[in-house]
Image (cartoon, rainbow, N blue to C red):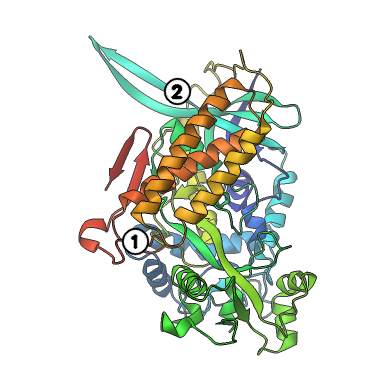
Amino acid sequence: MIKKTDFLIIGSGIAGLSYALKVAKFGKVTIITKKKIQKSNTALAQGGVAGVFGKTDSFELHIKDTLAAGDGLCNKDVAKMVVENGPKRIKELVKQGADFNKQSNEEFDFSLGQEGGHSAKRIVYAQDLTGKEIEDTLVKNVESNANITILEDHIAVDLITFSSSIRRGLIVTEQEHYCCGAYVLDNRTEEIETFYSAVTLLATGGASKVYLYTSNPDIATGDGIAMAYRAGAMVANLEFVQFHPTCLYHSRAKNFLISEAVRGEGAFLIDANGDRFMHKYTKDLELACRDVVARAIDNELKTTGAKCVFLDISHKDSKFIKKRFPNIYARCLEYGIDMTKDPVPVVPAAHYMCGGVATDLNGKTDIQRLYAVGETACTGLHGANRLASNSLLEALVYSHKAYESSIKEFKKISNKNSITLDQWDETNTIDSDEAIVVSHNWDEIRRLMWNYVGIVRSDKRLQRALRRIQNIQQEINEYYWDFKVTSDLIELRNLATIAQLIIESALMRKESRGLHYNIEYPEKDDKNWLKHTTLKKETCKVF
């Protein structure tokens, strides 16, 4: 049976839910989400949303900071559009019920924080649980909307695309290549369902689970990017993986981030002897951009042999720390660390994909009726390195742009319900009796990516990683077509695809820029590499 919907949204973070609330006024909306609807990278975001509200701030300053962080590869038109539209979208969140810290009782008189790379205070926040506040607000609104169906414990397998053609004499020309839905595994029944949609939005988040150490939840397996690539969409700039400098280092702590805002409020980075070290790397010290700070910590660890460095804010008033960072304070206490008195052990970890599915200014991919928003997308905003707290901002602005564009497209579609789709075929497949293959390959991919395609790279390491991932890909491909599909196998397949795309992109770029640092090409090369790396199935291009 084919399930039909007007708008199919894959993902339930800030981008997908914001979009859903807007398009629901025009048609039936279905949200596919792998776990529970609140399970997303958005819900884990601590710092805040960047927006120009301060009296001493300006759009020009925010744009300048964004471009500086992006190290020459930001699209200036995109940066201008996102920054100038940001305050409207943040105010919209408040109207929907989001409660941000304020300086007074006035509706938009926000308390503003500062983070690395920002030249002014412009971070709108809700204590240190900003993402949770946003996610809870959007979920509440989505769940009360009669036009929106939420399907939890569902995972998309592949997009369904359709190519129409026109014949002129002996020549057949492709007229249109468009997305018309997706195959989706219902984890509860273990059945794969066929979803037809007039418009499809990818909002599946990032892919940092491809690395052994990450701040991301287990769901961040790059599903949207991998599916779009397999469907023929262009992906871009996947070599630019942002490693957050300060994840909690503790044997019992999993994926817990110590927010950039802690450094923004005056925390120092120190070594095991209690000495600060950032002055050796940059005049911006702890408030340098994430790529600089992460590489500095990585170098300190490799030079000294230490397992971690420390983030120290104990010189600040204890009442201020507890009030400003209640969640971080409480979590650290669980592991025996009182951040009002003790330095917090931290290490870098994979955090954010600056690359993704290539889109235009409206979030459109190069496949008709397919949009990508949030960390899944490469819009051109982040360039070679994302400025802190620009991620939630981008998701808000682009979900609105995608809404405006897709509604126009939706109204023009004449055959909304007339296409016949093939249903999923499991003929000649059997239940897997070798689950160890999946778990072993999952572990091997994440370790090889951490060891060979991490913060500091070399062509030799990258080539070694490429050979290994190609072997793994072949093994996964054989396994995929022989056995019934499971959620673990889907995620493994996507992780392997993402890993290969990151490696191939990194091998293409013969310089060091932003988040991509290659010891064989330690300098930037604006003459030859002030451009984007793009990959399309069966082809590799640079432009």
Amino acid tagged 1: Lys
Amino acid tagged 2: Phe
Q: Earlier in the sequence, mark 2 or mark 1?
A: 1
Quarter that holds the N terminus:
top right
Front one among 147 and 192: 192
Place residue 500 in its image quadrant: top left
x and y percentages locating residue 234 in the rendered image: 38, 40
Residue under numbered circle 1: 76
Front one among 361 and 505: 505
Mark 2 Cα shell of 10 Å, populated few (<14), some (14-19), many (≥20): some
Q: What element carries label 1?
A: helix
x and y percentages locating residue 378 in the rendered image: 43, 50
Residue 489 drawn above or below residue 246: above
x and y percentages locating residue 446 in the rendered image: 55, 49
Describe residue 127's horizontal placement relative to residue 523 as left or right: right
User: What residue sits 52% from the left and 69% below the top?
Assistant: 51
Residue under numbered circle 2: 162
Front one among 141 and 352: 352
Q: What element carries label 2?
A: strand
